[in-house]
Structure formats: structure tokens, C-alpha cells
Amino acid sequence: MYLIVGLGNPEEEYSKTRHNMGFNVINKIAEKYSIEVNKSKFKGLLGTGTIENEKVILLKPQTYMNLSGESILEVMNFYKITNDELIIIYDDIDINPGNIRIRKSGSAGTHNGMKSVVNCLNTEDFCRIRVGIGKPKDNTDMISYVIGHIPKEEQESLNKGAELAEEAVIEIIKNNVDSAMNKFNVKKDF
């Protein structure tokens, strides 16, 4: 069984922001595999289903980004999920829009949601898919950039990154993390 988590913020005002790329990917997977992510449990919204003959739990923590780890830890403890069965998807300012990076472990960097996950799980050893959102081109405040309005011309490349992340999840489940890293950790210009 895999626990696939998208990080984001629960309120509607954040739904179309760069910071909710994790939620966007979960929504794409849920739609493709007809998994309803609507059970309110473990401080999150979750749904169960099957991908590539493997049972999965899709989770969108509803704790706000900075406390995401609390929800994840509760689900992992209840379902006895190991770190090897965990995939976390989130936005990354250090990766260009339209690109993703997959890693088996690593630090949380500057991402507050990942800091919460690493702190709650007490480890950095779990799979993560970082979806590129890039950095502001002008002197825009970083918080305004990640939770602010996305210009129409940028939406296409962000959607491409979400699609790649969805494909990467399926590759991890079907084959393994190494296969997904080899296939998707390639820089593309969009």
C-alpha cells in the first residue's frame, strides 16, 4: 500500500496558487483513477483506491501547510505505512515551472510543509516529488508569489509540471523510485 500525499492549503482562496501544486497533483491522480478524496479523517481529506494493481491512499492534509506532518503521521500510524510506501508531492521555488525532481531522501530546504513532515516523521528518508514553480522575476515578496495569483501565461507550464508529477507517481508504483528518477529528473525548458 502506498500513501500519496499532496501538500497544500485547504481554503478555496489558495486552490489556484503555486503553493497548492501538491493538491493539484492529487486531484489529477484522483480523477484519472476515479478515487474520491472526500473522507475527512486524520486532519486531512483522503480517499482509497487502486493504481497499477496496488492499493493506495491519497491524502490532502487540511492542517495548513506548516502542520502537514501531523496529518501524515496519523495516517501512517493508523495504516502501518512505512517510509518506503510514502510519496510526498509539493511545490519547489528552486525548480523551473514545468519541471519536477524526484528524490529518495533529503532535507526540507526552505519549504515549511516539508519541515513539518521531516519533524513529525523524524526522518528525511522518504520519496518526494518536487514540482517546479520557479522564483519571481521581479522583486515580488516570496509569500505573495507562492500564494498569489498565477498569470495565465504561466499556467500552462505549471500544469505540465503537475502532469509530470502524476506520471512519476504511477512510474514509482509500477516500477520503482529509481526508474522514475531516471525517467523524470531531466531538465526541460517551458
Image (cartoon, helix red, strand yellow):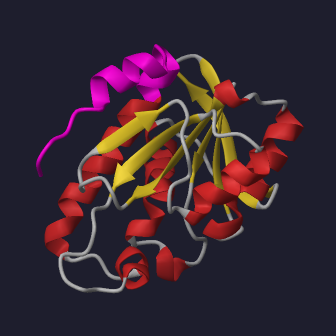
Q: Is residue 139 left or right of residue 178?
A: left
Question: Residue 120, percent across and down?
Answer: 78, 51
Residue 118: say if magenta: no
Determine whether 159 is above or below 127 in the image: below
Which residue is at 23% across, 65% downward?
155
Which residue is at 73% across, 59% downward?
44
Residue 38 shows in the view? no
Determine whether 93 is above or below 129 in the image: below
Q: Is residue 122 left or right of residue 21?
A: right
Residue 175 shows in the view? yes
Residue 173: say if magenta: yes
Which residue is at 61% across, 67% downward?
65
What span is in magenta? Answer: 170-190
Determine whether 119 is above or below 105 in the image: below
Question: Residue 9, percent across and down?
Answer: 57, 70
Question: Residue 181, percent across and down?
Answer: 37, 25
Q: Is residue 162 left or right of residue 90?
A: left
Name the outermost residue toward the top: 175
Determine whether 185 is above or below 99 in the image: above
The quarter of the image holding the N terminus is: top right
Q: Nearer the viewer, residue 161 or 101?
A: 101
Q: How many marks?
A: 0
Name the outermost residue toward the right: 78
Q: Where on the picture, by quarter, is residue 157?
A: bottom left
Question: Residue 32, percent across and down?
Answer: 43, 39
- Main secondary-structure element of the magenta-colored stretch: helix
